[in-house]
Amino acid sequence: MNLIAAVDENWGIGYNNQLLVSIPDDMKFFREVTMGKVVVMGRKTRESFPGGYLKGRTNIVLTHEKRYMADGTVVVHSLEELYQELEKYQTGDIYVVGGESVYRQLLEACDTANITKIDFTYTADAHFPNLDKLPEWEITADSEEQTYFDLTYHFLKYEKRSGGKTGQKS
């Protein structure tokens, strides 16, 4: 499985259930990478999307709210139920898209992370796990420096080193 996120220098990803910044080329990258794939998210992340869900993708929401229902979305209520649902798909076609709790719960089951690393520190109340501090993760690709007005950022690919733990069969 894959993770995909835009993070600031402190691995912040959001504030008040909103992205820290909207960078058009990052949004385009996210769309291109996830289109036609399976996206796994929490309820609050799903509700933060314009239109409520990501069109052109299989949307799966992991939530503890038993009565939660949403159009265009498969809703699961436990990791066990999520993994049963994900057995229908190739693991390389599954992207975890947030928020913080879902990233943390599924980190061990993933082997690739597409991270847009923004060279700025924002006020954030949600964070992605800091892959630079986890010895099983390493950067395997780094784009040239990108700019958006006065912001600089890189598209990074992290991969779990062989021998790293995974929570699901590939």
Image: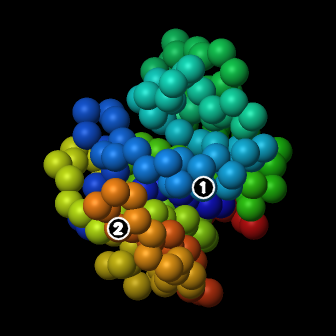
Amino acid marked by disc 1 = Phe
Which residue is tagged 2? 152
- Is residue 113 visible in the rendered image? The answer is yes
Left or right placement of residue 135 versus residue 93 in this view: left
In the image, residue 16 lies at what x, y percent?
25, 33
Q: What residue is at 39 percent from the left and 73 percent from the top?
A: 131
In the image, residue 56 lies at what x, y percent?
75, 34
Vertical placement of 119 versus 76: above or below?
below
Q: How is the image coloured?
A: rainbow
Amino acid marked by disc 2 = Thr
Task: Say which element carries label 1.
Answer: helix
In the image, residue 33 lies at what x, y percent?
67, 55
> Are the residues tagged 1 and 2 within 8 Å (C-beta)?
no
Which residue is tagged 1? 29
Disc 1/disc 2 C-alpha distance (Å): 16 Å
Q: Residues within 10 Å of mark 2 (few under 14, many from 20)?
A: few
Task: Say which element carries label 2.
Answer: strand
**Sequence-first disc among 1 and 2:** 1
